[in-house]
Image (tube, rainbow, N blue to C red):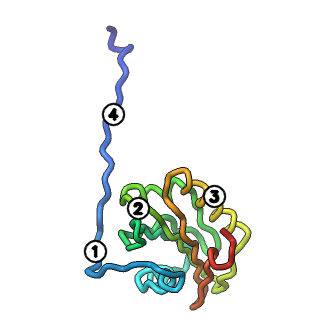
Amino acid sequence: MREEDRTYVAKVKVSLVKEGTVNERIVIDSQHDAANLQFIRDELLASDREMLICLHLNIKHAVISYEIVSVGSLNFSVVHPRECFKGALLANAAAIIVYHNHPSGDETPSAEDVAVTKRLVDAGKILGIEVLDHIIFGDSRFVSLQERGLM
């Protein structure tokens, strides 16, 4: 075989790197539980740009981990299902909750927010990872798209 006819394939290893841990087991039983996670609120409410976070949950809806998936501009954040589910797959999550903020202070979901959520729900069905909710934070209030029937 000639050298130029050889095919080279790289072998890769994919793994999850945990940056820190919490000493308590947190179980999400409601939208209220999901929206009142202080570490999520701290991340989102401190940001002056749109940020999207995915919370990874096990089969009993106990929190496994969370990931900042995207940081955008003042009023826009790029969201693609592959980025949302990459961390969830690596964490062996059974479900996710998606969060993002509106730095304008108005937590009202946009048409784009609803469309992105529906894409995530559809992708989650294919992957076997349920999207339980998409929660949007404004200044100090939040909206649950699941509670509003927008999923």
Query: Which callout, 1 or 2, points at the residue further toward the start of the chain?
Result: 1
Residue 102 is left or right of residue 14, and the answer is: right
User: Is there a contact, CB below 8 Å, between mark 4 and mark 3?
Assistant: no
* Number of the label disc, if any, that sits on residue 21: 1
Crowding at dot 2, Cα within 10 Å, few <14 / some 14-19 / many 20+, comes out as: many
Provide the residue designation for mark 3.
119
Give the tally of numbered discs: 4
Q: CA distance from mark 2 to mark 4?
A: 27 Å
Q: Kindly identify the residue that appears in the image at 35 percent across and 25 percent down.
A: 8
Provide the residue designation for mark 2.
93
- Quarter-wise, where is residue 114 in the image? bottom right
User: Is there a contact, CB below 8 Å, between mark 1 and mark 2?
Assistant: no
**Which amino acid, by three-letter code, is at mark 1?**
Thr
- Give residue 49's position: percent from left, percent from top: 56, 75
| Vertical order, 8 against 40 (above or below) | above
**Which amino acid, by three-letter code, is at mark 3?**
Arg
| Outermost residue toward the right in this view | 111
- Give residue 144's position: percent from left, percent from top: 61, 79
